[in-house]
Image (cartoon, rainbow, N blue to C red):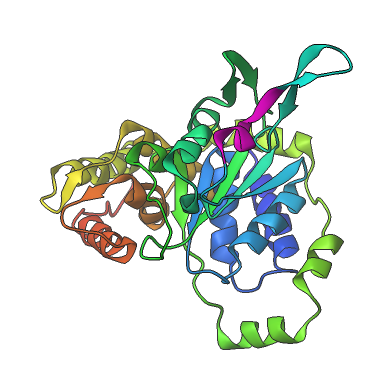
Amino acid sequence: MEAAKFVEFKKKITENCSKVILGKEDAMEKIAVSFLCGGHVLLEDVPGTGKTVLFRAFAKSVGGEFKRLQFTPDVMPSDVTGINFYNMKTGEFELRKGPVFSNVVLADEINRATPRTQSALLEAMAEGQVSIDGTTHTLPETFMVAATQNPLESQGTFPLPEAQMDRFFMRLSLGYMNRKDELSVMARKSTTELLGELECVVTEAEIAELKKAYHEVIVSDAVADYMMDIIEKTRNHGDILIGASTRGAMALYEASQVLAAMRGRNYVLPEDVKELAPSVLAHRLTYRGVFKQSEGSSTFEKVLNEVAVPTEEK
């Protein structure tokens, strides 16, 4: 396993995306981690902080087909998956594929769609396939749902069910830019123009190689035990009603391997695990008496800090 290739991959993606959105290198790194792990990302923040722009820039950076779907209450499941329509000329039914048949699907403001439409993404995210009129259709091998949602306190939103939240590999938040970066963005040319100038900076072969290679990153017994200590703590803590799933544990393991490789190492440190745990696990939990994302995140941070970090490798 050549860690240098992961470092170069992250550098290419970050530098290319930074031509459009400034000061969000940490979010770019985590999105790249999710992408190599074959996971999906949920980016939650207030409107106008650059969520859609960041995903557009990332999609251009990695190449492949990109589709954007703006969710509203009147969007139907067939608008996501596609439909079989009757062709009057041929006298046969033909498949008209929906946006989900793309490499990167931007599901913008996913929580403004009704639960029925939200669930149309579930099979695609979990199995890499969709069923239309009883027929199963396979999605592209490189497939990622990049969803944005407004905070649940906003009007006109439908909370995502627990099962669908667990399908997201990570949940991230951008936050506002710092003063210097925001002044630069205000003075420069339009974002649309900048996005149009972006080019793909990695090849399909590079992506395929890295997706296989990260499994070779070493996770020591001490670090694996630390991961399980965190997982078990979420299942036994008084402030948490439903703890992390096995899917969540596997996601934390794989994400830690990729992050370590992107930072030039062939082994995972406890610090990698602790840094990723909030993004990978916090959204998968059900908290007692918590209705806001900020409250849930604070509870998870408290739980995480109660778990002892191993001080040396065995």
Q: Position of residue 99 (x, y in %)?
A: 68, 38
Left/right placement of residue 291 relative to residue 186 reads left
Total count of labels:
0
Observer-nearest of 169 and 12: 169
| Outermost residue, right side | 89
Q: Is residue 14 something that shows in the picture?
A: yes
Instruction: Tell me the quarter of the image containing the N terminus.
Output: top right
Q: Residue at x 18, y 41 (%)?
A: 235
Instruction: Check if residue 110 falls in the magenta segment.
Output: no
Instruction: Tell me the quarter of the image containing the C terminus.
Output: top left
Give the residues in magenta: 76-84
Q: Quadrant of residue 299?
A: bottom left
Q: Quadrant of residue 196?
A: bottom right
Q: Residue at x 60, y 73 (%)?
A: 23
Q: Is residue 261 something that shows in the picture?
A: no
Instruction: Check if residue 77 falls in the magenta segment.
Output: yes
Q: Quadrant of residue 124?
A: top right
Observer-nearest of 256 and 233: 233
Q: Position of residue 92 (x, y in %)?
A: 79, 12
Left/right placement of residue 82 relative to residue 71 reads right
| Outermost residue, front side | 88
Q: Residue at x 13, y 43 (%)?
A: 236
For residue 140, above or below residue 177: above
Left/right placement of residue 119 relative to residue 262 reads left
Q: Residue at x 51, y 50 (%)?
A: 73
Q: Position of residue 27 (x, y in %)?
A: 55, 61
For residue 132, above or below residue 227: above
Left/right placement of residue 230 relative to residue 87 reads left
For residue 301, above or below residue 89: below
